[in-house]
Amino acid sequence: MRMLAWLPVLLLVPAARHMIESQMALHMLFEFPLLFASGYAAMRIMEQRMRHWLALDHLGIAGLTAASCVFAFWMIPAALDAALLDPAVAGAKYLSWWLAGFAAANALRRATIEIRIFFLGNAAWMSATAGLLYLDATSRLCVSYLFGDQETAGRGLVLLACLLAFLAIRGPRARGFRF
Amino acid sequence: MLSAFAGSVFALTSGFAHWTFEDRRVALAQGGALKAPALVLDDADGKVRQAWPGAGKNRVYLVDFIYTRCMSVCQVLGSEYQRMQEALRTQAHPGVMLLSVSFDERDTLADLRGYAERYRAAPEHWIVGAPHPGVAHLLQDLGVVVVPDGMGGFVHNGDIHLIDGEGVLLGIFAYDEWEQALAAAVRYEGGGL
């Protein structure tokens, strides 16, 4: 957990960051999840100490809503370009994805099965929609990426959608739950 | 929290209207919000020329961004610029100037001359040049992004930029809209739209 929490330090190395961010699929499907996972791990480490504060988030709805907003925002093509061209937006990206993971880690544990399915299902649907839009586009939607990159990222987002849908119905809280 | 989200999306997309960087750029240009930094070029004949500022409001430039090894969009742009040059020659619009700016640092004077000769660019209508000292600032301020294609070339913006003699970006036209670009340039030359 501790190692995972510190992994985004990797992005401080300009060569590594450039390598990851120069490919749309790596940017969206490696860097975003990496930051999310780091925030997630940090929360799991600090959860015990923060439990009084965390209790304020009834059933984790606030945390999951925040994480969903972050997810939705970074699916927008203009946001990806802005993150590459404007350092302030890049900073907001790192922070928001990390916080999304931080918020979601505890919220997912507090959520009931219905809430969990609602939010993860919603994320799956969003990822699939964005992925199919990127796959369907006949021109480059991001000026910073090649057309082939966009297709790869589109395919990756559809796969991510499948994974999220799987997690929605087969997560730890869903055990024993049958449709 | 939701209003913060809606606010950020609103700001990013200029009011839920422009979801891609390029759409946003075109909208900004239409509002006159983009300005190019001073542009000094080494042209294909080795002359140093200042395009803007200082050329006055009645001078307009139709600017494209190229590299001479380009096998795709620059060739299309080259032929279109050739047709625009023909039009300028026959219709006499002294205030309209064509400008092809190389963004590839590998382009030498000989490369630029080769490009100019290939498309018969006449310096009184069409200048082919490389910015002096570098192109990075110009591209950044105009929102033109050049991506290496991994094969020694670039994928880049093929738009035609209408820029006045003070460096203000007046409009952006897709590479197949050269007729509209030229018509707009002629209107500006005649004292604005």
Image (spheres, coloured by chain):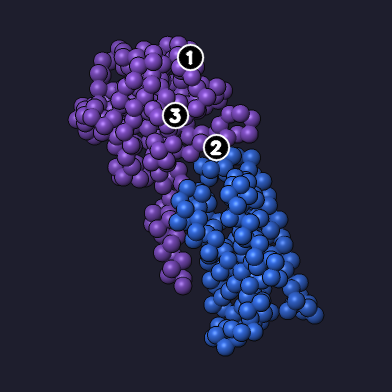
Nearest the eye: B143 or B37 = B37
Where residue A36 sits in the image (x, y, percent)? 62, 65
Q: Mark 2, residues whose alpha carbon is within 10 Å: few (<14), some, or many (≥20)?
A: some
> What's the mark number on residue B147?
2
State the residue at coordinates (28%, 23%).
Answer: B96
Nearest the eye: A90 or A117 = A90
State the residue at coordinates (58%, 66%).
Answer: A98
Q: What secondary structure is found at the residue carrying circle 3?
A: strand
Mark 1 or mark 2: name the one nearer the start of the chain. 1
* As drawn, A40 above or below B39: below
> What's the mark number on residue B5?
none
> Looking at the picture, which amino acid does disc 2 mark?
Val
Q: Chain A: give its colour.
A: blue
Q: Chain B: give its colour.
A: purple
Q: What secondary structure is found at the residue carrying circle 1?
A: helix
Spatial distance from mark 2 to mark 3, Cα to Cα?
Answer: 13 Å
Q: Badge 1 is on which residue?
A: B110
Where residue B51 sits in the image (x, y, percent)? 30, 26
Q: Are marks 1 and 2 on the same chain?
A: yes
* As drawn, B7 above or below B52: below
- The chain to which mark 2 is attached is B
Nearest the eye: B55 or A2 = A2
